[in-house]
Image (cartoon, rainbow, N blue to C red):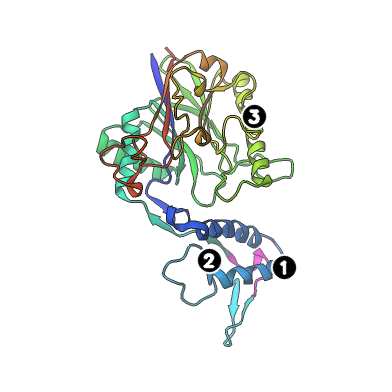
Amino acid sequence: MSIRIATFNVENLFSRPSAMAEDSGPAGQAAIDAQAELNAIVRKPVYTDADKARLIELDQIYKFSALSAPQKVLLVLVKVRGQLFSRSQAGIVTVVADGAGDWTGWFDLPRDNVRWEATRNTARVIAEVSPDILVCVEAEDRHTLLRFNEQVLGVEFNKAFEHVMLIDGNDERGIDVGVLSRYPIEGLRSHVDDRDAHGGRVFSRDCPEYVILLPSGQRLVVIPNHFKSKRGGNDQTAQRRRRAQAETAATIAHNAVQTIAPLVLLAGDLNDTPDSHELAPLWTEGFVDVQSHPDYPTERPGTFNTGTAANKIDYLIMSPQLQAALEHTGIERRGSYHPHLWQAFDTVTGKADEASDHQCLWADFDLA
């Protein structure tokens, strides 16, 4: 029987950090970067003078210590216990906590609701592709993915999946990878705590392994991922991290072939092109992307934005035995709005209501 597998960047289904909105510009990226830096500082058991100076510097930008915050903010301080900042009657702000033990709190990115039209168009793309297994990238959490599955895919299109799974990962913005499946998920393993050579976490989100029991009785190992983005810049640090992610993900996939099942799929948004140095470790042990199939679009091979070759960043990477079962592949573009390049769905009338700035990559496999 033919089984269709797809990957799609759903870009947060019901809400999205304001800093990640298209119109947030450089200020949005600055807030994302500041959140990561601030949370790294306040987790420390002891705050140095330099740490405190940096907290004060960022407070001057984002006004965390203000008695009333501006109406529209991109970054907020969440306090549960104690105080991080103090403000004198003269308006002088100081850091009064000497370390993480003196208070409880963190820095967060406020969220805006996603337009209903965009959420519905996300479901429309999935309904049109009609995969049996879908890798979802940038879903908020499992409960959100479950609600989307039941209340949008199910109610609006009668295309709900029976099995919904997502393991929360390392990204504090609520950007996770998960799986929707019509077949039972028999096992799962997280790699959220895998460490690199410097002791840091390898994966920006996670590199989970989902063992799916197919109707034939065979087992398919699906490994979703979302590598380090270029959005905040593509300096050597970002490049090294994507390279480390590719090396570790490749090892996980190769081990799965040997220890779980020969049918292995590594899929998702890897934020780089097939010819990049960063992704080179993935093309080992006979693993290839579905782009290798004659059916794959050649005029616009990309899966992001305008679909050029430089925008080929979404993947369905197959083990040799899975590649042998590949029948057809394609890209569903009608959920993204580029009227001079292709015809979108009639419900996609502009960038504000497009399903995603990624397109849905799919493939059919003969896995009888």
Q: Residue at x 40, y 19 (%)?
A: 3
Query: Residue 280: which disc?
Result: 3
Q: Mark 1 points at which residue?
A: 50
Q: Residue at x 42, y 42 (%)?
A: 357
Asked if the magenta segment contains residue 98, the reply would be yes
Query: Is 91 placed above or below 173 here?
Result: below
Q: Mark 3 touching mark 1, by CB under 8 A? A: no
* Amino acid type at image mark 2: Leu
Q: Which residue is drawn at 44% across and 24% down?
A: 297
Of the pair 273 and 12, the residue shown nearer to us? 273
Query: Is 318 placed above or below 228 here?
Result: above
Any part of residue 82 in sight:
no
**Quarter of the rendering occupied by the C terminus:** top left
Q: Mark 2 points at which residue?
A: 77
Pair 3/1: label in front? 3
Tell me the element at label 3: helix
Which range of residues does the magenta coloring cover?
Answer: 95-104
**Percent x, y for residue 143?**
40, 44
Spatial distance from mark 3 to mark 1, Cα to Cα? 39 Å
Of the pair 38 and 270, the residue shown nearer to us? 270
Q: How many labels does the image show?
A: 3
First in sequence: mark 3 or mark 1? 1
Can you tell which quarter of the image residue 288 is in? Answer: top right
First in sequence: mark 2 or mark 1? 1
